[in-house]
């Protein structure tokens, strides 16, 4: 019991939870926007990789950190545009296209990395985002180290949660996105463009996914490794369901996952001699499956998810 | 009342789907204050014409023009619902176009405000509420649409058009899903709107309401303009002749031979107690060689009865017997094998798989039986042969057995279902809203087939809101209200007023009160 107290009582633990959650927040928001408009984007895993690589490379080649963030977002948007062209314009299978994008984006990133840096053996480093200490607030007890040890990208992620929620629920744009994911005919009959809305949502959503990747190379670490995304994209796909496609719950889900992950690292250090380490690595995934089982049965799916739309067709 | 320039003018509209000509050089004018009824058989091209007018479909030839003030008319760009809306055209589609996850108010606002603005909800609500007061189209604006009744959804659809200051209102089969009372309410609204200068086009298969509400009638037949009538000078015969090109034969019903009970309900309850659509201890039977009409306003427990007879549910309490044996397991396949035929209420959704071929849809309930499969494998050749024969026998109008079912018009989907269920000579038939949305020719055909099945000895339960239909078919009436069933007795002893009162929940009919 003491072990648990020690872990949950430490500011360090909560700071780590938020740090682990940050890329997931970007990813889950991106996936949420795509799916709210009716498009599943399984390209997410590859877009994470591409965002991680492109952002890092831009900075390594001399761009500023925010320039790197912009490059990452544009890279994500480009893959999003491809996915949208295949699934929204041509109406092809969203699963097949998404997996294809993941394979393409991953290998294209590795290829670019290798050709841009043919001679390096150990991954070169950049100077990443530093923690954002607002007016010395990090000296506050407990909350100081938890919140003000975070970088600007984490704050951006939190800001985006509020922004996405606001757009989705308080603006006509959000209304149209929710409608197009439920019944495209409702949007078309009100004079809006189903195709336009869906392309826009997929492009913006994919840009956010890429920011999740960029966080890994520009904030959590300072270099790019192969395999560093390590399934985070897939976790986001599950978290969207867990969150019932709501930004607030998406934040909660990402934080929960971050907490589990931070918890297992610490628990492993405490009682790792008794239980094999793989069990701990499994823990967050196991818990997310469990959470899905409990939540997903009642999930309020966007009804038109996965359904292509063609003008002038009977549906 | 009518000014010289029309509100709306279609000229020589032609639309082809592959080799099929859905509209052939159709022209039409609509004036201010006018209610124009558009009639025609299923698949005649009514919806297609309206979809072109509204910009959902792009015509192959012809133009749509709308009044732009004075004597000027401007041509609408093809394929742009946005342009049609801006020109004051509002459309209530045959299948609702509402986002079910949004409230009624949000559905009405959709597409009317700049995408990146906010804080306009209040003004929107005020305007909608004003329209509601003026038109009498009452709805709960804050409720999510998936929680609204069909009638309420339709009112939201009309409000959508009025909110955009529509000058032309198109309604595609608005009454197909309404109860008679709701339809009356709708007509009152339409008359008021027309009196205020709106032009209305409405599509319907119910000649009675067409004669009662419209000023002018236009008839389409197989994509051609068959003719126009002034309603005041028209009667049912004249319209039917124009629509079908020949007189529609009346269905005659000879007294049947009532046999033993094939289905028995004994104090059956199903669903949440106290809920309107749940069943509360109902008892009745269906006998061989008899058509039983189940009258009632929809949502009073009909779906529960349909679910029980189709094997989708078993009673919470009480027993349902089939051929004397209690049914204890929800197993639709066993019921189908035992000779229960089902014509579902929502035939597009529950009756066919839209993306599968007509042939596969005909075979779908019986793929395991010999004749459709051999050694456990599907026998595609046999299925196609059976389908080709069924298409001819039941006059299913479609390009062929390989056509996708979703492309069929409503009437033809129903004929497809008839072909599927009647071909195997079922002993029990559940006909749930069998002719909803069907044209008069198809209606007569469905009725003829149902009566023929009864004469062959089948027990038939017809669920319908349409009293004309029930009186045409039924030997005996059951009336359902709030989950309870009243046996109203043989059809000969009943009249519409009595059944109507029972439907409204009055168990004391005028006669019993008098005695
Ligand atoms: N998008 C489409 N693709 C192919 N064929 C179509 C399409 N839309 C309609 N059709 C065909 O065009 C014809 C006219 O259909 P339409 O829906 O206009 O008939 P309708 O008069 O409205 O019939 P109903 O009374 O059943 O509603 C039908 O044969 C239909 O199968
Ligand atoms: Mg139609």
Image: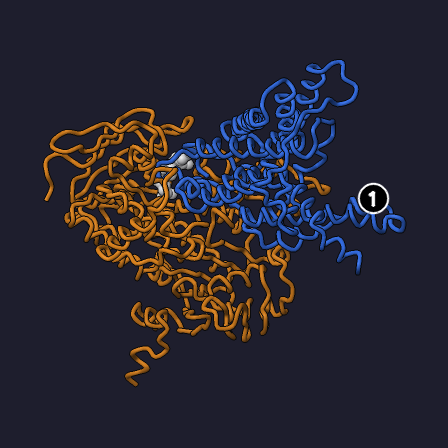
Chain colours: A blue, B orange
Residue B469 appears left or right of A132: left
Residue A247 appears left or right of B471: right
Q: Residue B509 falls in which quadrant of the image?
A: bottom left
Density class for disc 1 (Cα within 10 Å; few <14, some 14-19, many ≥20) is few
- Residue B327 visible, this orientation: yes
Ligand 1 in which quarter:
top left
Q: Which chain's residue wears label 1?
A: A
* Pick the front one: B80 or A279: A279
Residue furthest bottom in the image:
B515
Quadrant of the drawing holding the N terminus of chain A: bottom right
* Pick the front one: B504 or B415: B504
Say which residue label 1 marks: A278
* Pick the front one: A305 or A157: A157
Residue B337 is situated, as x and y percent measured from the top left of the image, at: 62, 55
Residue furthest right in the image:
A273
Residue B190 appears left or right of A167: left
- Residue B451 visible, this orientation: no
Residue displayed at 67% across by 45% down: A15
* Pick the front one: A67 or B416: A67
């Amino acid at each position: 019991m003491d072990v648990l107290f020690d872990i949950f009582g430490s500011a360090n633990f909560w700071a780590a939870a938020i740090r682990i959650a940050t890329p997931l927040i970007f990813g889950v928001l991106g996936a949420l926007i795509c799916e709210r408009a009716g498009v599943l984007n399984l390209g997410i895993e590859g877009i994470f990789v591409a965002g991680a690589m492109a952002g890092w490379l831009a900075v390594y080649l001399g761009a500023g950190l925010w320039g790197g963030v912009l490059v990452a977002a544009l890279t994500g948007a480009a893959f999003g545009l491809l996915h949208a062209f295949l699934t929204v314009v041509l109406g092809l299978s969203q699963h097949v296209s998404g997996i294809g994008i993941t394979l393409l984006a991953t290998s294209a990133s590795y290829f670019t990395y290798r050709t841009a840096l043919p001679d390096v053996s150990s991954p070169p480093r950049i100077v990443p985002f530093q923690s954002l200490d607002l007016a010395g607030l990090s000296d506050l007890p407990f909350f100081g180290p938890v919140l003000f040890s975070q970088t600007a990208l984490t704050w951006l992620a939190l800001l985006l949660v509020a922004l996405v929620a606001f757009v989705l629920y308080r603006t006509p744009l959000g209304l149209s996105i929710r409608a197009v994911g439920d019944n495209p005919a409702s949007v078309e009959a009100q004079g809006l463009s189903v195709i336009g809305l869906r392309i826009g949502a997929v492009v913006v959503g994919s840009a956010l996914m890429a920011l999740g990747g960029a966080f890994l190379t520009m904030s959590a670490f300072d270099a790019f490794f192969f395999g560093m995304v390590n399934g985070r994209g897939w976790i986001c796909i599950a978290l969207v369901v867990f969150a019932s496609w709501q930004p607030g719950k998406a934040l909660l889900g990402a934080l929960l996952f971050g907490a589990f992950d931070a918890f297992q690292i610490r628990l492993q250090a405490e009682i790792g001699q008794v239980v094999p380490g793989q069990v701990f690595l499994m823990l967050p995934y196991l818990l997310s499956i469990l959470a899905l089982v409990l939540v997903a049965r009642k999930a309020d799916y966007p009804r038109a998810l996965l359904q292509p739309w063609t003008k002038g067709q009977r549906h | 009342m009518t000014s010289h320039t029309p509100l709306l003018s279609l000229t020589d509209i032609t639309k082809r789907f592959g080799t099929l000509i859905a509209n052939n050089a159709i022209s039409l004018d609509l004036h201010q204050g006018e209610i124009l009824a558009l009639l025609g058989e299923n698949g005649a091209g009514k919806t297609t014409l309206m979809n072109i007018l509204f910009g959902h479909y792009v015509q192959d030839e012809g133009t749509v023009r709308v009044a732009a003030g004075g004597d000027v008319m401007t041509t609408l760009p093809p394929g742009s619902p946005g342009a049609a809306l801006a020109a004051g055209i509002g459309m209530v589609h045959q299948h609702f176009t509402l986002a079910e996850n949004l409230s009624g108010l949000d559905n009405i606002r959709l597409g009317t405000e700049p995408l990146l603005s906010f804080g306009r909800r209040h003004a929107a609500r005020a305007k909608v509420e004003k329209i509601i007061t003026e038109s009498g189209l009452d709805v709960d604006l804050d409720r999510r649409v998936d929680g609204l009744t069909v009638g309420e959804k339709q009112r939201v659809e009309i409000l959508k058009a009025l909110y955009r200051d529509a000058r032309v209102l198109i309604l595609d089969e608005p009454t197909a899903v309404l109860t008679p009372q709701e339809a009356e309410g709708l007509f009152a609204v339409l008359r008021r709107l027309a009196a205020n200068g709106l032009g209305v086009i409405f599509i319907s298969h119910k000649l009675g309401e067409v004669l009662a509400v419209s000023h002018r009638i236009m008839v389409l037949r197989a994509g051609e303009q068959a003719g126009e009538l002034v309603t005041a000078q028209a009667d049912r015969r004249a319209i039917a002749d124009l629509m079908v090109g020949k007189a529609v034969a009346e269905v005659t019903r000879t007294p049947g031979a009532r046999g033993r009970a094939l289905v028995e309900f004994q104090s059956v309850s199903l669903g949440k107690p106290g809920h309107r659509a749940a069943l509360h201890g109902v008892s009745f039977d269906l006998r061989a060689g008899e058509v039983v009409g189940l009258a009632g306003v929809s949502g009073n427990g009909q779906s529960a009865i349909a679910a029980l007879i189709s094997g989708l549910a078993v009673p919470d309490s009480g027993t349902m017997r089939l051929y004397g044996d209690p049914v204890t397991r929800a197993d639709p396949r066993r019921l189908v094998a035992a000779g229960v035929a089902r014509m579902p209420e929502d035939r597009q959704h529950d009756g066919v798989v839209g993306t599968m071929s007509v042939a596969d849809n005909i075979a779908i309930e019986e793929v395991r039986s010999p004749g459709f499969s051999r050694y456990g494998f599907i026998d595609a050749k046999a299925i196609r042969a059976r389908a080709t024969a069924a298409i001819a026998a039941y006059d299913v109008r479609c390009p062929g057995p390989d056509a996708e079912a979703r492309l069929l018009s409503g009437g033809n989907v129903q004929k497809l279902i008839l072909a599927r269920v009647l071909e195997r000579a079922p002993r029990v038939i559940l006909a749930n809203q069998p002719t909803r949305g069907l044209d008069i020719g198809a209606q007569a055909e469905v009725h003829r087939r149902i009566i023929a099945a009864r004469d062959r000895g089948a027990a038939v339960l017809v669920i319908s809101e349409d009293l004309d239909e029930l009186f045409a078919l039924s030997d005996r009436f059951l009336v359902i209200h709030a989950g309870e069933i009243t046996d109203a007795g043989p059809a000969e002893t009943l009249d519409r007023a009595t059944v109507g009162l029972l439907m409204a929940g009055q168990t004391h009919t005028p006669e019993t009160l008098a005695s």
